[in-house]
Image (cartoon, rainbow, N blue to C red):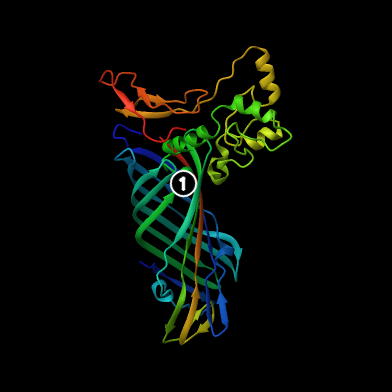
Amino acid sequence: MGPNGYLRVGETSQRGTRLLLNAISESTCPSTGGGSRVPSHRRDALRVRYLYEFLDGDARFGQTLSYNGDGFGPGRVHTNADFSLVSAWTMNAS
Amino acid sequence: MNAYNIFLTGTVGLTYVYFNPTLSQHGHSNSEDFYRQELPCSDRGCPRRCPVDPKASVRLEVSGGGLPRVDSGRTEGGTVYLRQINADAGLSLAYNVTRALQIDVGYHYSYFLQPRTSHEDDNAFLSERAGSALGLCSASELGQSGPSLLRAARSISYGFLQDPARELVQLRSATKGSPKRLDGQNLAAPAVSTEPGLVALGPARSSDKTLKNLHPIFRIPSGLASFDGVRKRAREGVTFRARCDVDPLGQRDGRVVAVRTDIEGTRRGVAGVGVRGPTGRRGGTCAMNGPAV
């Protein structure tokens, strides 16, 4: 199942077009990630996680898109909105 | 772990996002550098783990964090204000395929919202994803609720260095060559190198560089932290004993009723363990599952 949501990038007075994520990435790609735990104490551990979400693909638009003050389309537009997230937290077990 | 065998844990941390979306068409591209205005965002979680079987457990994990509308400290046509909400929830069944490998299958939901505004910009990004999730955890990831992790991690260190005094002697005899374990394996490239999570288990408190390098995961008792310490304690008539990690073998009503330890010097695990302590039954014997190390 692909992601839901949107991306909007506007510049100055030109409001950006709301690009739906399930429209800009035609192919459904899973998110992937990895993590590791570093035990720091008998009951605590530092946990690090890396998540990479693929939001990459081509889509055809029938109207001009406004993105960051620029115009794209109509026609086929390639979007690369890959998204990565790094988390680090401590964990306490009770 | 409470009376219902549910592991309760809490997490506190930070989240940082890298996002640089780019649109391109006919060789022309434009990107917006969200990452330049990112700030680490606080993240709190509350995972639960409920064992349903010696090898399986059900996990429920909820975590989230956010930032109110704050000044990001950057300017782009004026002050850039940032807001962020992130949340994750998951329900899964974890199964220990082996002592070092766990498969996690379940459902996961994630939500991420980040509006960013300035006098010049009006940007927003919302990502909402839900679906099945599949995870593979190595030994360092086993038992995400803590105690199980420690058991898994210690079982490795137990198999790797179960007799520090004997290995110290062995290392001393091999100071000029590549140090070997008694069974001939190279200590300079131990199995732990594939498990970075274990590195901080107990760094050797030693000024000896060799020991520091070769015993990254093992807690060397104070006084034995160097070869000189070993020699001095030996002169005093101290008998060195192996430090054996103890793995709870069975539990009844949350109490450990028996432990499995190494038969010192034999490098073998025990085949059967007599049950000690008030278990409600007498004369019982537990057969040990899992490989002898």
* Foreground pick, B73 / A4: A4
Residue A82 drawn above or below residue B40:
below
In this rendering, position of residue B70 left or right of residue B279? right
Residue that appears at 53% across and 44% down: B195
In this rendering, position of residue B43 left or right of residue B217? left
Q: Residues within 10 Å of mark 1 (few under 14, many from 20)?
A: many
* Foreground pick, B212 / A46: B212
Q: Residue furthest right?
A: B176
* Foreground pick, B10 / B124: B10
Which image quadrant is residue B55 in? top left
| Residue B210 picture location, percent across and down | 69, 34
| Residue A18 picture location, percent across and down | 43, 75
Residue B259 drawn above or below residue B39:
above
In this rendering, position of residue B96 left or right of residue A81? left
In this rendering, position of residue B223 left or right of residue B250? right
Q: Residue furthest top?
A: B237
| Residue B27 picture location, percent across and down | 57, 83
* Foreground pick, B216 / A4: B216
Q: Residue furthest left?
A: B281
In the structure shown, which secondary structural element does the residue marked by tag 1 occupy? loop
Q: Which quadrant of the rendered structure holds the N terminus of chain B?
A: top left
Q: Which residue is mark 1?
A: B138
| Residue B40 picture location, percent across and down | 54, 54
Amino acid type at image mark 1: Ser
